[in-house]
């Protein structure tokens, strides 16, 4: 726990994304009591305004118990599109406790592909496809899935960009770059040219902050391997931006 809510919490906001921080700011500005929840996974998380709690709940049952104890009126799941476990927990817990749940999920990139686009179903297929398409991949899939790439790309001179150092041993021919977006087109292009990247691998995260790599790849004629999003939990109302999520919350909390 890094900050205590100063009054009865109304909204539990499952965060870890820019959209969640935008929503927290809108709700705080509107005078709604919101507690943002972060997994506590990265070393220096970007903190939203308002109250913040850190760490997991202990699965769907733990989250349900937390919702009951704290008496939240609504929950917004604004976690990353690839954070499928916490989204499943949120759907199950909210249904069990009878608390309204909204999913805030930014639109994907696959609806508007640019350049030489290679959609794949998962990280294993991404690793195989990248191994086939290039010799010098640029991996931007996050450190949690790197273990799926170390085998198939052991002989490829990968450039790996991650926020925190990888937890797995990476092949000696790989270069690890610690960095965090947002990124600009010129810098992305220069980075890819400097590495002589011949294939880019990304999750279909969506959003503007990391999109310039797609435009840089298209400009350089570099193919892009795009891992599709996991299926969302069924039956959860979803909006695509923070403003729509704020309206949904205010409608239900009398703000
Ligand atoms: P995940 O695989 O869906 O979740 C793993 C476990 O971490 C969950 O079961 C939960 O633990 C805990 N957890 C996840 N998000 C949490 C949150 N907002 N508040 C409290 N506990 C949380 O999630 P992930 O992919 O590791 O992502 C972790 C966090 O990083 C999320 O907040 C997500 O929005 C953010 N993020 C993820 C990615 C990505 O590519 N996956 C990218 C950028 C940011 P318990 O079961 O104990 O409750």
Image (cartoon, helix red, strand yellow):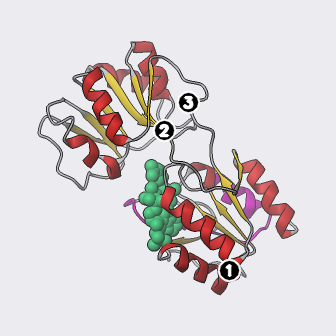
Q: Is residue 138 above or below residue 13?
A: above
- Residue at x-position 45% and y-position 41%: 181
Residue that carries the numbered disc 3 in the rendered image: 110
Quadrant of the snapshot with the C terminus: bottom right
Earlier in the chain: of badge 1 and badge 2, it is: 1
Q: Residue at x 67, y 60 (%)?
A: 24
Which residue is under mark 2? 228
Quarter of the view holding residue 233: bottom right
Left or right placement of residue 10 versus residue 4 in this view: right
Inter-mark Cα distance, 1 to 2: 40 Å
Label 1: few (<14), some or many (≥20) within 10 Å?
Answer: few
Tell me, yes or no, whether the two marked residues, 2 and 3, touch with CB atoms within 8 Å: yes
Position of residue 161 measured from the top left corner of the image (x, y, whole percent): 32, 40
Q: Is residue 34 magenta?
A: yes
Count of numbered circles in the view: 3
- Circle 2 packing at 10 Å, graded few (<14), some (14-19), many (20+), is many
Q: Secondary structure at mark 3?
A: loop
Q: Are marks 1 and 2 in contact (CB under 8 Å)?
A: no
Say above or below: 133 vs 157: above
The quadrant where residue 64 appears: bottom right
Q: Is residue 31 magenta?
A: yes
Q: Nearer the viewer, mark 1 or mark 3?
A: 3
């Amino acid at each position: 726990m890094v900050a205590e809510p100063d009054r009865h919490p109304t909204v539990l906001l499952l965060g870890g994304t820019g959209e969640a921080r935008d929503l927290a700011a809108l709700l705080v500005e509107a005078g709604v009591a919101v507690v943002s929840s972060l997994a506590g996974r990265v070393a220096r998380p970007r903190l939203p305004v308002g109250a913040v709690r850190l760490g997991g709940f202990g699965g769907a049952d733990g989250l349900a118990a937390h919702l009951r104890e704290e008496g939240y009126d609504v929950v917004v799941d604004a976690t990353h599109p690839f954070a499928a476990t916490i989204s499943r927990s949120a759907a199950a817990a909210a249904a069990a406790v009878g608390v309204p749940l909204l999913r805030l999920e930014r639109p994907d990139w696959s609806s508007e592909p640019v350049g030489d686009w290679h959609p794949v179903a998962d990280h294993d297929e991404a690793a195989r496809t990248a191994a086939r398409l290039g010799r010098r991949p640029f991996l931007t899939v996050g450190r949690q899935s790197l273990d799926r790439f170390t085998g198939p790309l052991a002989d490829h001179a990968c450039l790996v960009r991650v926020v925190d150092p990888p937890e797995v041993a990476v092949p000696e021919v790989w270069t690890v770059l610690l960095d965090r977006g947002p990124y600009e087109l010129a810098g992305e292009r220069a980075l890819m040219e400097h590495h002589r990247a011949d294939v880019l691998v990304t999750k279909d995260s969506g959003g503007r902050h990391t999109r310039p790599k797609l435009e840089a790849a298209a400009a350089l004629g570099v193919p892009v391997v795009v891992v599709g999003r996991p299926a969302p939990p069924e039956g959860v109302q979803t909006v695509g931006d923070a403003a729509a999520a704020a309206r949904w919350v205010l409608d239900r909390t009398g703000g």
